[in-house]
Image (tube, rainbow, N blue to C red):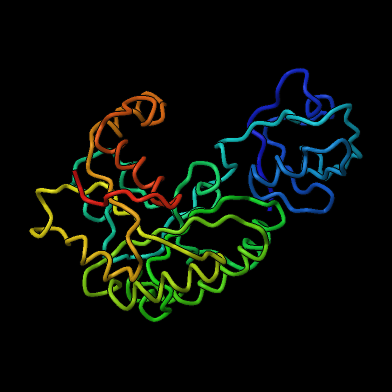
Amino acid sequence: MAIRIEQVDAGSEAEALGLAPGDELLSVDDNELNDTLDYDFYTDSSSFHLKARVADGIREWEVQRPQRGPFGCGFKTYLGDAKHSCSNHCMFCFIDQLPPGMRESLYFKDDDERLSFLFGNYITMTNMQDHEIDRIIKMHISPINISVHTTNPQLRVRMLANKRGGEVLKYLPRLVEGGIAVNCQLVLCRGINDGEELRRTLGDLLELMGKKNIRLIVNRVDKSMLGTVCLTIDDVMDAAGLPLAGIVPEDPHVTLAASFGQSLLRYSPNCKAAKASRRIARRIQGFHEPIALR
């Protein structure tokens, strides 16, 4: 593998070596370069052995640098190659439910661990292989966000419509044991991965993370909708199998606080969601506070 140079910064160490647009970086210290994560990780050193394919053949250099930092190469994309696309056909896929006629980029389904690290995207791991998990651990690419949905292998195959859906669950303990922070999300489909399946999934994930004394917080609750199109709070507690720590009501001040880059308690300390958050915090500390939605 290699990554093709598109530009070389003037005055950079890459320019001093004679590297030019069109050259291909092959390896650093015998580590193959597949994308910009490899490039940034391995060139961020005071010394390294560089191998590249240039106009007149393969060249190698022993690079000695006065200080660590950018080496000076630019690439066609910020990843150095194309985004990894999703190979699933999830029963709940929101992209498949988009209306026609929107801009093309909205219909692209990514499933790329690099975007998970860089931008917080969630991945399913179904297009990953062992060596990619090894790289995450070696480089300590953390956190990684994973769409788990269920820890039942057969059910995950069904939900993702991908025969590797269950097989790749083996990567979760490898990542955790490798010191990678793993954030998990579950998209619940009524009658499919809720109820006993949800209890199993939560139990498996909590055991994996070594967590104890877990309690449930139900967020963005619209009181007018309870018992109609939405589950009741009791339904949610029964499905999760967890004690309730508190309820946070739907509140537009949360969105406004986020848009201004402020914490909710600073932006609007007396709004409904802020008051609910303070009650939950006090309850966790052992104080008696009402749970009622108000």
Identified at 30% across, 72% down, the residue is 193
Quadrant in the rendering for residue 198: bottom left
Q: Which residue is nearer to you in this view: 73 or 244?
A: 244
Tell me what residue is drawn at x 68 percent, y 58 percent: 137
Task: Please provide percent x and percent y for residue 124.
Answer: 45, 62
Q: Quadrant of the N terminus?
A: bottom right
Residue 182 versus residue 27 in the image, above or below: below
Q: Is residue 179 above or below residue 158?
A: above
Q: Residue at x 43, y 79 (%)?
A: 153
* Side (left or right) of 272 relative to 25: left
234 relative to 166 in the view: left or right: left
Judge by depth and name the residue closer to the eye, 106 or 75.
106
Instruction: State which quadrant residue 234 falls in.
Output: bottom left
Label count reads 0
Pick out the residue farthest to the top: 11
Quadrant housing residue 185: bottom left
| The one of 195 and 167 positioned closer to us in this rendering | 195
The picture places residue 190, in percent across and down from the top left corner, at 21, 69
Q: In the rendering, at what x and y percent does residue 270 appear?
A: 28, 29
Which residue is most to the front? Answer: 288
Quarter of the figure with the C terminus: top left
256 to 41, vertically: above or below = above
* Residue 201 horizontal/vertical position (percent): 41, 72
